Image: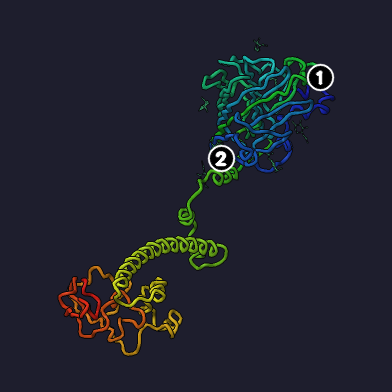
Amino acid sequence: MRFLSILGASALLIAPAFAQTWTLCNPLNTTCPPDPALGISHNFVFNTSKTVSDSFNITAGALTYGSNGAEFTVAKKGDSPTIQSQFYIFFGSVSVIMKAASGQGIISSIVLESDDLDEVDWEFMGGNSTHAETNYFGKGNDTSFDRAFYYPVSSNVQENFHNYTVVWTSDKLEWLIDGQLVRTLPYAAANGGNTYPQTPMTVRLGIWAGGDPGNSKGTIEWAGGLTDYSKGPYTMYVQSATISDASTGKAYEYGDHSGSWQSIKVVTGTSQVNQTIVATETPHLSMAQKFQALPQTTKLAIYGGSGAAGALLLAAILFSCIRQRRKGRKERDAYNAKVEQEREEAYRDQMELREKGLGGWDKKEFDHQGEDALGGWGGSFVPAGTQANALPAEKSKFPGSVSVNEVPSRMQTPSLASPAPQSPRQWSGGNQGGLVQNAGNAYSGGYGGNPNIPRSPAFPLSPQVPQQRSPGGYTNNAGYSRF
Ligand SMILES: *[C@@H]1O[C@H](CO)[C@@H](O)[C@H](O)[C@H]1NC(C)=O
Ligand SMILES: *[C@@H]1O[C@H](CO)[C@@H](O)[C@H](O)[C@H]1NC(C)=O
Ligand SMILES: *[C@@H]1O[C@H](CO)[C@@H](O)[C@H](O)[C@H]1NC(C)=O
Ligand SMILES: *[C@@H]1O[C@H](CO)[C@@H](O)[C@H](O)[C@H]1NC(C)=O
Ligand SMILES: *[C@@H]1O[C@H](CO)[C@@H](O)[C@H](O)[C@H]1NC(C)=O
Ligand SMILES: *[C@@H]1O[C@H](CO)[C@@H](O)[C@H](O)[C@H]1NC(C)=O
Ligand SMILES: *[C@@H]1O[C@H](CO)[C@@H](O)[C@H](O)[C@H]1NC(C)=O
């Protein structure tokens, strides 16, 4: 697509239509900044705008994205959405998976273009759904138009995605359709190599209306006729492009004004595109993996808890603590449930004793028991320093005279159903009716009243209890005769 010289002076007016074939700086007659390299092979998938914004420049118009990939649309006169790679390849290959646009005069194109206007093309005429055009230019030499060749494609190029590939070395250029070689251009065949494309290339994808009524007759003819915008919009779809740079490095420099491939210098290093792609494609790592990947100095900074890294660590610790607390809460809940069950059993037993008119019971005090998770039963295990808080002085369960040989613990919740047979333990509450004054817990309830009665080694207690006769029948003074 190089018509500037045929079009003569009027070319400038329509130049923007040929969106792909221009250069900002021609190294043949001036010194240009280095060309950023691709330096790697990468499959660019055009399923989001990110691929373009990361690695391409939109040089005209705007793209949309759909299930078919990037959409390049001509909807009206002047539309020519085009993208250009931010990187250059210095030999290599380009495979584009695309579906060409329909519409007479509409040109869908894949163009490799260098700063000194070497060019390799795939072009699709919207009025021709069966063939693909291949072409090339060297140093912008367009004195002849005998280089364009058309090749049939296995199925409709406007309805099906096909793989259009260029393999480019210093020896030859190859064009392949769906993996089938259709054209080979040996170096020498291009005007003895003089017009052989051989300088670092950008990759440009775009669409434009060669059939716009404002274009020259020659251009409109080549494009396949006048474009009728009212029948549009016309859209080219690009799914992906696998682009491989045969050279590795971060930039390419023209060593002189010859434009020969031998004059190109490769600047070693990691390309910007590589860095961007690596950053984009790095999978989302876990906190631990990220930490592992950090340089040692950063790790030390984190260990030291300094700066932002320290804050990160703090967040990690906090997270871990919350998890610990959750775990702790679960354990506590389970523990509390167990305590609750034990309390219920003890309560039932107490009620039974009470029913028999036996034993002390102070529900209010009992309710105080086990309210903390510290394991104190009735307050007896509350650490000395906090005892007063836990149990107000007036509620103290232990009169001064009480001696306790074995403190019942929460974990050994009293169970009336089966006191340990190896008793007697000395749970004597004296004459006060129980271990705790006015309370009567499960250990003491019902045993009070007679300090001489040893605690039963086993149920029933009755054998140890001297039964007493009363005029009205049986009675006893301790209330355990039933057992
Ligand atoms: C640079 O060289 C090209 C090709 O020879 C020529 O078309 C262009 O006018 C030159 N540009 C300048 C600024 O000399
Ligand atoms: C891209 O850059 C990374 C990091 O510098 C490097 O390890 C990797 O080899 C490069 N990728 C390729 C394909 O060269
Ligand atoms: C785009 O394609 C890439 C590569 O195949 C894939 O990893 C990613 O999930 C795709 N994104 C969307 C939004 O489809
Ligand atoms: C892409 O655009 C940026 C910002 O405008 C510019 O610096 C860079 O040279 C462009 N890349 C190419 C290959 O034209
Ligand atoms: C498509 O292009 C080929 C090659 O130039 C040609 O043989 C064929 O007739 C064209 N088809 C149409 C419908 O123009
Ligand atoms: C341009 O190409 C034509 C045809 O291939 C050739 O005859 C001519 O010498 C070339 N011009 C230059 C300056 O290389
Ligand atoms: C496109 O064709 C090239 C050349 O045969 C091949 O290497 C590449 O894997 C193909 N790409 C896809 C996506 O099929």
Quarter of the displayed picture in which ligand 4 can be seen: top right
Percent across and percent down for residue 420 are 21, 72
The answer to whether one can see residue 458 in this image is yes
**Residue type, mark 2 in image:** Gly
Q: Is residue 446 above or below residue 120?
A: below
Q: Is residue 361 above or below residue 160?
A: below
Q: Residues within 10 Å of mark 1 (few under 14, many from 20)?
A: some
For ligand 2, tell me if the residue under mark 2 lies within 8 Å: yes
Q: Is residue 437 above or below residue 377?
A: below
In screen coordinates, is 163 left or right of 323? right
Q: Quadrant of residue 84?
A: top right
Q: Earlier in the sequence, mark 1 or mark 2?
A: 2
In screen coordinates, is 151 left or right of 17? left
Residue found at the very far bottom of the displayed protein: 401
- The total of numbered circles placed on residues is 2
Percent across and percent down for residue 307 are 57, 65
Q: In front here: 204 or 231? A: 231
Q: Which residue is mark 2?
A: 39
Give the residue drawn at x 42%, y 72%: 371
- In the picture, the quarter occupied by the C terminus is bottom left
Percent across and percent down for residue 374 are 39, 73
Q: Is residue 316 above or below residue 56?
A: below
- In the picture, the quarter occupied by the N terminus is top right
Q: In front here: 29 or 214? A: 214
